[in-house]
Amino acid sequence: MTAASGLLRDVFGFDAFRPGQEEIVQAVAQGENVLAIMPTGGGKSLCFQLPALMRDGVTVVISPLIALMRDQVRALREAGVEAGALTSGNTDEETDAVWQALSEGRLKLLYIAPERLAAGSAPGMLRRIGVSLIAVDEAHCVSQWGHDFRPDYLRIGELRRALGVPLAAFTATADAETRDEIVTRLFDGQPPRSFLRGFDRPNIHLAFAAKNGPRQQILSFAAARKGQSGIVYCGTRAKTETLAAALADAGHNACAYHGGMEPGDRRTVESRFSREDGLIVVATVAFGMGVDKPDIRWVAHADLPKSIEAYYQEIGRAGRDGAPAETLTLFGPDDIRLRRSQIDEGLAPPERRMADHARLNALLGLAEALGCRRQTLLGYFGEEAAPCGHCDLCDQAPETFDGTQAVRKALSAILRTEEWFGAGHLIDILTGNLTDKVREKGHDRLPTFGVGQEFSRPQWQAIFRQMMGHDLIRPNPDRHGALTMTDAALPILRDQQAITLRSDSVAKPERRPAVRA
Ligand code: ADP
Ligand code: ZN
């Protein structure tokens, strides 16, 4: 684990970098002059906040939006980072506290509004406090031709010269002309290290599949790519070992990798993987940080990743050489249950847990998407894209049906049994399956009993899974995973909103698992 990824997890509570972040963080932390252009919502602030923690001294952040500055300062302080702002919105106490922290050498990030730079004392003050980095948010404000022009931004170049420290400039919008202007005005015309790469990795084929005999699904995927280097990510250490054995039995060159292994054994796997052709590493997420192999031809997820960021990072290890690469991500209701309970049972404060659920929802939305995966994925990171023609849903549009009535029936079964039961029992009720439990609980007398006979049991399972994917229902960790309804389901329950579901992801009858010798 690198210093940066440790801080990412421990301070910011994120399990993976967003696209582009890691490279930018490294460059900024190493003191390079940097110009980074990332879409709105792409996660720019982390690209200067994290390096600020890795460097000695104070990072000065110049940002034109006072409300945003105050937000960031609040969030940083909640995460235990010493940050403060000097803006016209400050109370005297706030300003005093900032000066106090500065004079004690505690402050790591000082946010200042650009108009502060106009006050003649600013450069002298900043020189005294030991600034080691200047970060400029919304750097396009330096452009006199843009509509966001801030005259005070013109003083930033002067400040950089006066302090003699590296500068990192960030913006979401920069056409070539604005970019040139930023380079001229902020960097004296000396081209900084620029990051303009979009998030798209067009050579990577994206695909998801509902779990249906998952071991066989992975074996088939690997069999079609025999002799190519690949990674299979698993949710547990135990599974890496059993799946690696199954792949080896099927004639592949495969080995397991997880954090519980001896460091020496782990290094052996790492170096074999980079040296040998066609090795499959079956690993937990512990594998990857140090892996820099350009010709990984495929990445499969035997279990659903933790978040959409983790997904992007993990599939992004494939095809770094730009040649075609394949991915397959499996998911099922148990994964969703596991990921939700990991979040609920974690020690994170409530707001962070809510954000974690939202990031998981984004991944589930991608898993259950009805249109182009790439468009959905890039859209989440703030980038617009046309349907890609290179994902499973572009290859073959999914069959869909109006699932509104089915979902309402399922919700009704959940509510009439007072949110005390899991999908299995609820499906018994919906399909009119008179089990002992149904009889014992008197659920055969519910008006919902037998109202869902138009769908088979596997079809109902797929409907419940999609309902979880759309976050209409969640397993209740205090009731052994009994399903409860979320507020998002209310408009559907009240028939104010319709919902389209996929009919093709409905599980087919289980294939017999391959017999292992
Ligand atoms: P912008 O690029 O628009 O300034 P922000 O820095 O405000 O974006 O980040 C947008 C959102 O993304 C924030 O809610 C932030 O917490 C979240 N975010 C940033 N980096 C990550 C990450 N590595 N993993 C998960 N969420 C992240
Ligand atoms: Zn597509």
Image: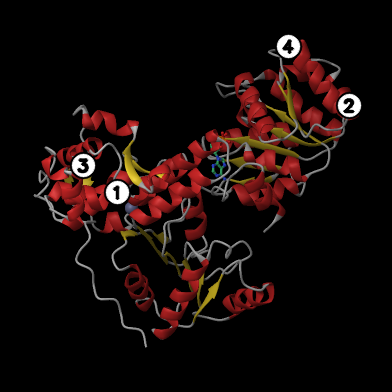
Residue beneath disc 3: 410
State yes or no: Cβ of the residue under disc 4 lies below 8 Å from any atom of ligand 1.
Answer: no
The percent position of residue 402, horizontal first and vertical second, equals 16, 41
Residue beneath disc 2: 103
**Label 1 to label 2: alpha-carbon separation:** 58 Å
What secondary structure is found at the residue carrying circle 1?
loop
Tell whether label 4 touches label 3 (CB within 8 Å): no
The amino acid type of the residue labelled 1 equals Gly
**Label 1 to label 3: alpha-carbon separation:** 11 Å
What secondary structure is found at the residue carrying circle 4?
loop
Count of numbered marks: 4
Residue 411 versus residue 53: which sits nearer the camera?
411
The amino acid type of the residue labelled 4 equals Thr
**Label 4 to label 1: alpha-carbon separation:** 53 Å
Q: Earlier in the sequence, mark 3 or mark 4?
A: 4
Which quadrant would residue 87 be assigned to in this image?
Answer: top right
Residue beneath disc 4: 91
Residue 246 versus residue 393: which sits nearer the camera?
246
**Label 3 to label 2: alpha-carbon separation:** 62 Å
Kindly report which numbered mark, 1 or 3, lies closer to the viewer in this rendering: 1
Kindly report which numbered mark, 4 or 1, lies closer to the viewer in this rendering: 1
Residue beneath disc 1: 422
